[in-house]
Image: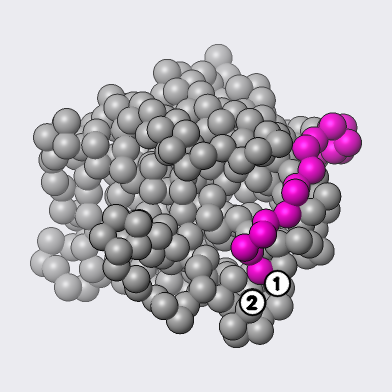
Amino acid sequence: MITELISSESATSFGALYRTLYYLCCGGITLTLLLLFRNRMPCDQGRAYAVNGELSRGKIRGVGIHFVLGYAIATLLFVPLSWELSVLLLLMIASMVTGFLDDAGSVPWSGLKKGLLDLAISLGAGFAAWQFYGNTIRIARLAGFSDAGSAPISITIPWPIFVLLAAALVWGSINVVNCTDGVDGLCATLSIVALTAFALLAIARGTADTILTQRPICVGMIACLIPYLWFNASPSSMLMGDAGSRALGLLFAMLALRSTYVLFYFAFCIIFMLDGGLGLVKLALLRSVKIRILKNTRTPLHDHARKNLQWSDTQTVLRFALLQAFIIIAVLAATGCFGSVAWFINI
């Protein structure tokens, strides 16, 4: 009965109220978990090679488990359950659990162990994306440069190749977001910017206005990140750890696959890719073919900004977020999305 009420055009006000309660529940449950279990969490042991890494020693670590669980609990309470939603939450929880076990361990897991676990989760996510969203991706045209108007270009990819490409996107997203989590407030702030972009994309290119559309999924996680960011703002007292960053990385990739406009991921998460991804590429080239790139650039880039450019933590977070927001606005404007976006009037 609730699903029919929310889906009905005559019940718009009820649907808006229902979504508002969902968002409040997301934030409320997350805040409750953060406060109740703050003294039962593992403590960070510092990072030897990170800029100001010793300042993290002793801080509560792994609290990403709280905002992921807060998100899952609120979503199960308010969103009509489906196979798609169930699998999405299970994948996020799997990423969260593997990350939390690493956070809680006295010795960090090896790169091989984490890589294999990420690979298994990513392959599962790629297969799920094919089953639920199909193997056709859409590419938005540039506004004003096509006689076809705003009709996107559709490309169908053979399903085995699609599953592998989707898995690669998920694996990459998990790892670049994880590598970005090294400055107080940075990962959460960039995540809120990216989730806002995915919500705007859903408004511009979305379908029926139901609780199961992409907008509530994005805004629900934003509502969970706000209480965490309260404690993670510089100087922080809590760190999300791998438990949070890996789950967020998976969510971003799945949102891109869910929208079918997969290439928007590279605009919405561009700072994640540059900040965390360049270091992964640099290390991979050095270890595999002994090629050294970016010799004078410290990676992740947030360490270069703080050490070489002498930016404060606050400057790093704000400037990175502004750069990501500017790129998102430019891409959405270039593809004509703002023409059909009513901003957050009907979010």
Q: Residue furthest front?
A: 290
Find numbered disc 1 in the image and state the secondary structure of the residue it sits on: helix
Query: In the image, is 165 to the left or to the right of 60?
Result: left
Find numbered disc 2 in the image and state the secondary structure of the residue it sits on: helix
Residue 169 position by quadrant: top left
Residue for point 31% across, 43% down: 168
Q: Main secondary structure of the magenta part?
A: loop
From which residue to which does the magenta span run?
A: 34-51
Mark 1 or 2 closer to N-term? 2
For the residue marked with disc 1, what is the amino acid?
Asp
Residue for point 24% across, 37% down: 164
257 and 342: which one is in front?
257
210 and 252: which one is in front?
252
Q: Is residue 36 magenta?
A: yes
What residue is pinned by disc 1? 313
Above or below residue 83? Residue 6 is below
Residue 238: x and y in percent read 78, 49
Above or below residue 208? Residue 304 is below
- The reply to whether discs 1 and 2 touch (Cβ–Cβ < 8 Å) is yes
Q: Is residue 290 magenta?
A: no
What residue is pinned by disc 2? 306
Query: In the image, is 320 to the left or to the right of 77?
Result: left
For the residue marked with disc 2, what is the amino acid?
Arg
